[in-house]
Image (cartoon, grey):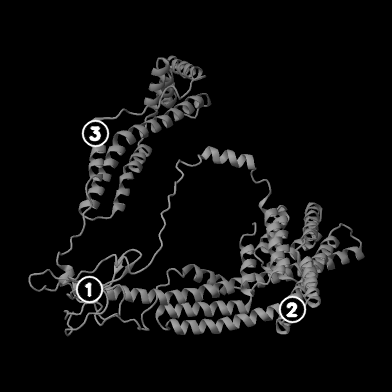
Amino acid sequence: MSKRPELRPIYSLLTRVQRRERAAEALALTVRVALPAGLMIAAVAVIGARLLMTPIDWTLAAVAPIPVVLAFVAVRRRSLRATARRVDAHYRLHDQLGNAIEFAEHDAKIPEHDPRTREMAELAIQAGANSVGGLAAKPVVRFIVPRPRLLDGLALSLLLAALLLPQRVVELPEDRLATGPEVPDLATDDANHGLDMTRAEPLREELRKLEASKEEEIARISNELLGVLSDLEAGEVDQKQALQKLEELDEQLLEAEAKLEEELQEDPWMMAEGMRELAEDLREHDVMREVAEALAKSDAEEVEKELQELMDKAEAEGGDLKAELDKALQEMERSLARTSKENTGTEKALEEAERELSRQEKNPAEDPEEQERALERKKERLEELQRQADREKAAREKLEQLKELSRQSQGNSQSGGSQEKRKDAQQKLSKGAGQASKQSRQQKQMGEVRDAMDQAKSFVQRSGQNGESQNRRKQQQKNFQKAAKGQKGQDGKPATMLTEGEVGDNPDGVMMGEGQEGQGEGEGEGEGEGQGQQPGQGQGQQPGAGQGPGMGDGSVDALGDPNSTDVKTKNERVDAKQGKGQTRSEVIETASQEGFATESYKRVYRDYKSFAQSAMDNEELPEGHRRRVKRYYQMIQPQ
């Protein structure tokens, strides 16, 4: 390639043309070579999967020809001279570009003593450089998809024929049921038989997260819960022992909840809501992004660290960083003020409880014991609401304090007193925000541990029921296998056999017998029961009366005696509504007339949560139900 500057446009044009040549060749080879080859490979893979039971994943090899074709096109070398001739032929330049390249690249072969030849070469080079202006690569090479060929149709037909082949099924011996091996004795009480914990994997995953909690008591209980589930899976403990351990852990969890309840001065749900809304509001400020993420995760230590480092950095650098921090602190001030002023409905519920207690005292019940119980309930309710109101008041005071500290942390004054006061407020703000996040984390994780405890108990209880059901099914299979071997009938009659639905009605669970004149009663769906009085044939049993449902030659009426029960019947005719129902357009039209949702989810969530809190304050609910309601609203809170 010549380095003469006047030839650069020519080389640039030829490079673009070669790129289009590669793309066009790749398209043609993909359609003409890779496509039929891939169809044939896929057909062979499908035939192998249907007839030879090979893995169906082998069909993925059908895409292998495509990268092979693309690699071939990429590594194949192309002649720059041939490309120049192609451009000359397309634009009818009479080999001006090709001659210019040849003379420029073989300039050293022109004799020095032949000025005429050198002058002609320079004229050819100049003519090529002048003719390249306005030329484009796109008209030279066009992308054309090749037409389908007979080979393509044959490859596609082969694949379709392979897909129509039936799937091979492993054949079983016809007499497997009759001559199969005996079912071994069931080990229903085998303590070394582990339990399948597949369905408990989400619960264990949640417990692993809680195990890494920074709260020691929560981490310990979560670790022991995981240990109980692991022992149950390994078969080291049975269902009864696992439930006993869970009860012990439940008592420890109740003590931890009571201790946390005593230590809390502020309402944890209000503090958690305040920190969550604060995290949402601070996400809009880039300077507070890490602080907001820590608040959202309730990472108290990270909140205090990030906030303090940010304020120290802003104090040291000043300028734009300090201005952005002040804006974020103003947003924090507004968010905390908004949360502290939210109405939870507790005050209203407290006033209502006081009125109910007063009415109960003025209008006592006739029974003194009932009056005493009613007064006791209403007093307990009043005391509970009073404690809740006191905690909400303390939470509002805490939020107001944080709001005031965020206001004092703002400003650019560099005077000694103002700067010292601002730094002190910033330290208190970071520490207070960390403490609030810690309270939120404690309450949230304590609720998660409680949910995990309930789920673990439920899972262990269900596992015992599933084990009994599985053993019953195995016993039924054993009985059916025994009966399926056949019992030769008497007097040329065919053999009779019956598999009981419940295990344990008789020693074998199977009764074969013949009886006479069975008397039965039936109702509902018309099933009757007969009791034969003739000697029957049991599976290895002595002759005797067959107890329970049986098959015989008696005159049992499947519908029972129609006169045995006096039932008043009345015929009713019901005309069902016919039609296709509302169409989708009618549903949308009705929705548009009634109005679509116009309120934000965040606002609707606040209204519904306040209503639920008010309802819980006004009604007597078990503590477990209150916890579930609070947990529900915690799970659906807007992110």
In this rendered view, identify the residue nearer to me: 417 or 118: 417
Q: Earlier in the sequence, mark 3 or mark 2?
A: 3
Relative to 131, say whether 522 is above or below: below
Q: In the figure, is residue 320 to the left or right of 631?
A: right
Residue at x 33%, y 44% (from the top left corner):
63
Whole-percent x and y of residue 287?
Answer: 73, 55
Q: How many marks?
A: 3
List the residue tagged with mark 2.
365
Mark yes or no: residue 110 visible: no
List the residue tagged with mark 3.
151
In percent of width and height, residue 460 lies at 46, 76
**Image quadrant where residue 370 sits:** bottom right
SS class, disc 3: helix
Residue to which mark 1 is pinned? 518
Q: At numbered mark 1, what does the secondary structure look like: helix, strand or loop?
A: loop
Number of the label disc, if any, that sits on residue 464: none
Q: Residue at x 20, y 80 (%)?
A: 533
Q: Quadrant of the N terminus?
A: top left
